[in-house]
Image (tube, rainbow, N blue to C red):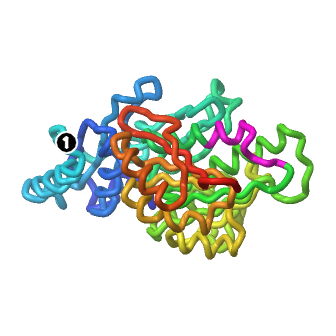
């Protein structure tokens, strides 16, 4: 996804813009970003500070020539409809008109380094790592792809749970650890797995010539697959079958290079759902399944989890409201999974699942 245009690009030099400002309700953030992306609105940012995670504002810039008042009113109605399934009312949208400007500054200035858990750092791709976070594992993400930047509570819950799993007794580091990211979006969870599990292997003194971590990521949206490719290139991670990304960090002459902790693992990315993931795994299920998608989708996919998650493996499921946990737990139990709510933030929760009975 290209960055927002500079002066004179887009609809014409000297044009004016509408700046949309909207207080973000936690339940609606992912849906709002998805809807704007689907409508071709890519100049988007979430304004927040890590120290005040609950105060978040959505910003979007729209060319005034393309968005007269009737179209803006239609956009407001389309965004308001996203709140209905949650029984919420969308906060009032504020419109500010402004002249042309340097978008590379106005858009990017709203993003900053964001520490997650005790060891991770979500870092906008164009920023240097702040000295205060030099000891963290940086995951470089291009927010322009708008498929998940680590700021949403469901993503943070997954990242924190992944960190706890990597640092706990669950992973067997005497052999390559296999992880699946189902519904990978931006690829942030897949890249975090590479960073954490590669670093964990080194910390344990592992000397196996085999990769310490093998990550398999799928998404049904081809744009998400491209976003994962792009963010992998930002982190110096080579992905088989991905187009070269000239000029991306960690690349030389268009060829992706492994750098840092990512050297200890490999990443494969494909378009598809759980069936596509099973095909990508070629009959070798994973130790850890990451799934940050909506509760109804999790419920629909639950019977097929056994085709991708090994007996004794663990699934970390997010993207669900705490109020949805009882019904989803019952549906998972019917599919043979024991589910436990192990973390929550605001209205959002994270379930850990394992197969019921002995393994």
Q: Can residue 102 be seen in this snapshot?
A: no
Q: 122 and 316: which one is in front?
A: 316
Q: Quadrant of the C terminus?
A: bottom right
The answer to which image quadrant residue 167 occupies is top right
Magenta stretch contains residue 334: no
The answer to which image quadrant residue 105 occupies is top left
* Residue under the point 77% across and 42% down: 199
**170 in relation to 343, above or below:** below
Left or right for 120, reference 20: right
Q: Residue 341: give x, y in percent of width and height.
A: 49, 39
Magenta stretch contains residue 169: yes
Residue position for label 1 = 88
Instruction: Give, as a single range, the part of the protein colored magenta.
Output: 162-173
* Residue under the point 32% across and 43% down: 27
Q: Can residue 14 be seen in this snapshot?
A: yes
* Residue under the point 59% across and 62% down: 217
Left or right for 120, reference 214: left
């Amino acid at each position: 996804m290209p960055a927002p245009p500079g002066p004179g690009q887009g609809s014409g030099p000297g044009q004016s813009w509408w700046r949309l400002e909207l207080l973000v309700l936690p339940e609606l953030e992912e849906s709002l970003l998805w809807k704007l992306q689907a409508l071709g609105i890519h100049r988007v940012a979430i304004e927040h500070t890590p120290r005040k995670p609950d105060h978040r504002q959505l910003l979007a810039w729209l060319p005034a020539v393309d968005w007269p008042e009737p179209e803006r009113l239609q956009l407001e109605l389309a965004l308001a409809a996203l709140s209905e399934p949650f029984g919420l009312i969308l906060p009032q949208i504020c419109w500010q008109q402004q002249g042309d400007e340097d978008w590379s500054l106005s858009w990017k200035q709203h993003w900053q380094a964001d520490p997650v858990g005790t060891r991770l750092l979500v870092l906008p791709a164009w920023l240097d790592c702040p000295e205060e976070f030099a000891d963290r594992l940086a995951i470089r993400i291009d927010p322009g792809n708008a498929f998940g930047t680590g700021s949403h509570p469901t993503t943070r819950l997954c990242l924190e749970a992944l960190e706890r799993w990597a640092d706990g007794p669950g992973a067997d580091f005497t052999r390559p650890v296999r992880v699946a990211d189902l519904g990978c979006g931006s690829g942030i969870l897949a890249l975090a797995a590479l960073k954490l599990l590669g670093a964990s292997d080194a910390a344990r003194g592992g000397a196996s010539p085999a990769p310490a971590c093998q990550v398999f990521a799928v998404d049904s949206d081809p744009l998400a697959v491209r976003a994962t490719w792009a963010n992998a290139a930002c982190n110096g991670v080579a992905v088989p079958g991905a187009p070269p990304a000239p000029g991306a960090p960690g690349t030389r002459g268009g060829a992706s290079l492994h750098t840092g902790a990512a050297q200890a693992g490999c990443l494969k990315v494909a378009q598809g759902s759980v069936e596509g993931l099973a095909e990508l795994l070629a009959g070798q299920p994973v130790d850890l399944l990451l799934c940050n998608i909506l509760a109804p989708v999790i419920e629909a996919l639950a019977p097929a989890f056994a085709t991708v998650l090994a007996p004794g493996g663990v699934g970390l499921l997010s993207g669900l409201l705490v109020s949805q946990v009882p019904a989803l737990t019952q549906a998972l139990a019917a599919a043979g999974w024991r589910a436990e709510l192990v973390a929550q933030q605001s209205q959002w929760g994270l379930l850990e699942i394992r197969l019921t009975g002995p393994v």
